[in-house]
Amino acid sequence: MTIQSVLHDGKNAPSYDKPAIEGGTVTAAGGAATLNKAAGVVTTAALSTAADSTYTLTLTNSKIAAADIVLVQVDTVAGDGVPVVTRVTPAAGSVVIVIQNNHASSAFNAAIVIRFVVIKQ
């Protein structure tokens, strides 16, 4: 058996137990969204955040406590701009996510997709 066969034939692949994480999806409006899940995907409204400026998303979520760790990544960008997560601030029942447009001259000109997962402390 080769590594290639393990990766591609599905018969010899190892199995791993995946932790059950309840997830969901939501579309943000006006920089805010509500999703009461431990993980999820937030699609923003179409953004026009200027170069070297920030977009702030406030996610209301009853699963988040102030001491929790919230991991965030920008998943999809359809337009211009270079989104970078610069700050994630959990609070009781919410998290504030700040995304900076690191492009030198182009503004965001489309929605972006943000993924998150809550790690309980």
Image (cartoon, rainbow, N blue to C red):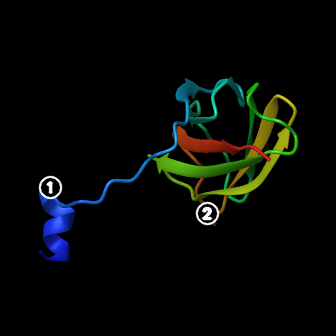
Q: Is mark 2 in CB contact (under 8 Å) with mark 1? A: no
Residue at (65% x, 63% y) in the render: 102
Q: CA distance from mark 2 to mark 1?
A: 45 Å
The crowding category of the residue bearing disc 1, from other C-alpha atoms within 10 Å (few below 14, some 14 to 19, many at least 20), is few
Image spot of residue 19 (x, y percent) = 52, 43
Residue identifier under label 1: 11
Q: Depth check: give the residue in front, 45 or 1.
A: 1
* Label 2 SS: loop
24 lies above or below 56? above
Q: Which mark is residue 103?
A: 2
Quarter-wise, where is residue 29 in the image? top right
Image-based side of 43 in relation to 9, left or right: right
Tell me the mark number nearer the camera, choosing from 2 and 1: 1
Image spot of residue 6 (x, y percent) = 19, 66
Residue type at the position of mark 2:
His
Residue type at the position of mark 1:
Lys
Q: Depth check: give the residue in front, 116 or 12.
A: 12
Q: Depth check: give the residue in front, 91 or 63.
A: 63
Residue at (39% x, 53% y) in the render: 16
